[in-house]
Amino acid sequence: MSSPDGDRERILATVTDIVSAEFSVPGEQLDPATVLLRTEGGESVKLMRATARIEDEFGVRILSRQQATWSINDFVDQVLLALASASARRP
């Protein structure tokens, strides 16, 4: 079983890769704490596509309407919460 910190690092790397691809910005130029729509290449359509890819990648639904103010770290937190919630519902 992996540790929560290991899970966070893995999810952070994957979310960064997805955002990098959708925003056409090298991953090493993305600060995980910066609001995505304030980054170079940040547009709402790209954010929606990135959100859909993140949901597909992790098999979760991100239900917040506040995504326009989110950073990569916020997406990672939401994925971790959704995965923990799904795990808690399993018998």
Image (cartoon, rainbow, N blue to C red):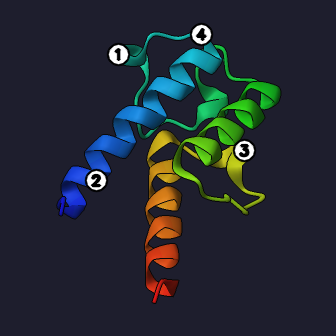
For marks 2 and 4, give the one nearer the viewer: 2
Name the residue nearer the viewer: 90 or 84.
Answer: 90
For marks 3 and 2, give the one nearer the viewer: 2
Report the quarter where the N terminus lies: bottom left
On screen, residue 85 versus residue 22, left or right, reads left
Name the residue furthest right.
Answer: 45
**Mark 2 belongs to which amino acid?**
Asp
Few, some or many residues within 10 Å of mark 2 (<14, 14–19, 20+): some
Kindly identify which residue carries mark 1: 28
Q: CA distance from mark 4 to mark 1?
A: 12 Å
Kindly identify which residue carries mark 3: 68
**Mark 3 belongs to which amino acid?**
Ala
Sequence-first tag of 3 and 2 = 2
72 in relation to 22, above or below: below
Kindly identify which residue carries mark 4: 24
Few, some or many residues within 10 Å of mark 3 (<14, 14–19, 20+): some
For marks 4 and 3, give the one nearer the viewer: 4
Secondary structure, mark 4, is loop
Residue displayed at 63% across by 43% down: 56
Few, some or many residues within 10 Å of mark 4 (<14, 14–19, 20+): few
**Mark 4 belongs to which amino acid?**
Ser
Kindly identify which residue carries mark 2: 7
Secondary structure, mark 2, is helix
Sequence-first tag of 3 and 1 = 1
Residue 45 falls in which quadrant of the image?
top right
Residue displayed at 72% across by 44% down: 68
